[in-house]
Image (cartoon, helix red, strand yellow):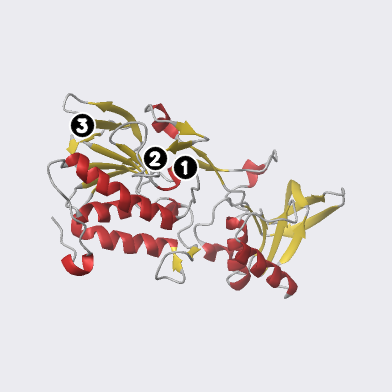
Amino acid sequence: MIKTDIIIIGAGPVGLFTVFEAGLLKLKCHLIDALPIPGGQCAEIYPKKPIYDIPGYPSIQASVLVDKLMEQIKPFSPGFTLGETADTLEKDNNGNFKVTTTQGTVHTAPIVAIAGGLGVFKPRKPPIENLHTLEKKYIHYIVKEPSIFDKKNIVISGGGDSALDWALYFAKNYAASVKLIHRSDNFRAHNDSVQKALNYAKEGKIEMILNSEVYSVDEKEDNIFLNVRSKNKETQNIKCDNWLPLFGLSPKIGPIGNWGLEIEKNAIKVNNSTDYSTNVDGIFAIGDVNTYDGKLKLILCGFHEAAIMVQSAFKKIHPEKNNVLKYTTVTGIKGF
């Protein structure tokens, strides 16, 4: 049995930063993640994607952010159970939680912090029958290594942040040409990204095909042909090397949904007026996995939630102690 102060479900950026904030209070953490490496989506799904809203970094690759966080928490020697999914939760006679993974690894702690991001996720795929025969070779729902698209003619479908971000990225790097297909003329991405994409379209760096969607795909001589139909029923056939339908991820909360927590629209309800606690005393939820009025799904916000949460965790673990906030510029960073 693995004993610790805080069991953290999810080893993404928010889970990793929780280790740092807890370490400042001399609280020990152990992280559980279904992925085989730390970093969550930043490591597994878009390691090369640039992130622009991390304070102090005008731009930082997702994988580099993970590396920096791992370096930051190294003095606190956290434990990891990777490649295993947190499955069941019980409370023992001492009031501690016992979390058992699908592989049978048992962890116990007085506090559980759920930082599982979007939970168990799968890419949203367009409803086209023969997609599975063309996947891996031509069709990609996630961009892990941008260099494989070097000098390729690519088509991206979608109107959210992921589609716009990668369209802009490939217009500057690697791709021979970039086309962006979106079923509307309104985008769901950040205004800055939308404006940049529109500017690129005017400059001929991105070809936009709006109010349209791909309805079928054919393969011929190491190329795929996308059959595209507009809202006014006009059709066109587009030849390309690769198609990237980037419609986002379909998240599922997974086994955590059976832990007696209050769930709303596949997210865990928390009390954001205090400490991001759930309806179960001793269990907190931080990052994209939680929900409350005014919630913003940003890594930055998850970092804030982690900092607040560990203060309450300390009080529950050490009710006899009076914790006084001290700035790290004064105390420095000391491991255990």
Kindly identify the amino acid type of the residue bearing the numbered disc 2.
Asn
Q: Is residue 321 above or below residue 73?
A: above
Residue 80 located left or right of residue 303: left
Residue 167, picture quadrant: bottom right
Who's the residue at 31% across and 53% down the image?
Answer: 307
Residue at 47% from the left image edge and 54% from the top image edge = 298
Q: Residue 67 at what x, y percent from top left?
A: 34, 62
- Name the residue rendered at 26%, 44% in the picture: 312
Dots 1 and 3: beta carbons under 8 Å? Answer: no
Q: Amino acid at mark 3?
A: Asn
Q: Which mark is residue 292?
A: 1
Which residue is label 2 attached to? 271
Q: Say above or below: 91 vs 161.
A: above
- Crowding at dot 3, Cα within 10 Å, few <14 / some 14-19 / many 20+, comes out as some
Residue 34, given in percent of the width and then of the height, sits at 37, 41
Which quadrant holds the N terminus?
Answer: top left
Crowding around mark 2 (Cα neighbors within 10 Å: few <14, some 14 to 19, many 20+) is some
The residue under label 3 is: 96
Question: Camera-side residue: 274 or 100?
Answer: 274
The quadrant the C terminus occupies is bottom left
Give the SS element for disc 1.
loop
Image marks 1 and 2: residues in contact by CB distance under 8 Å = yes
Q: Furthest residue to the top?
A: 93
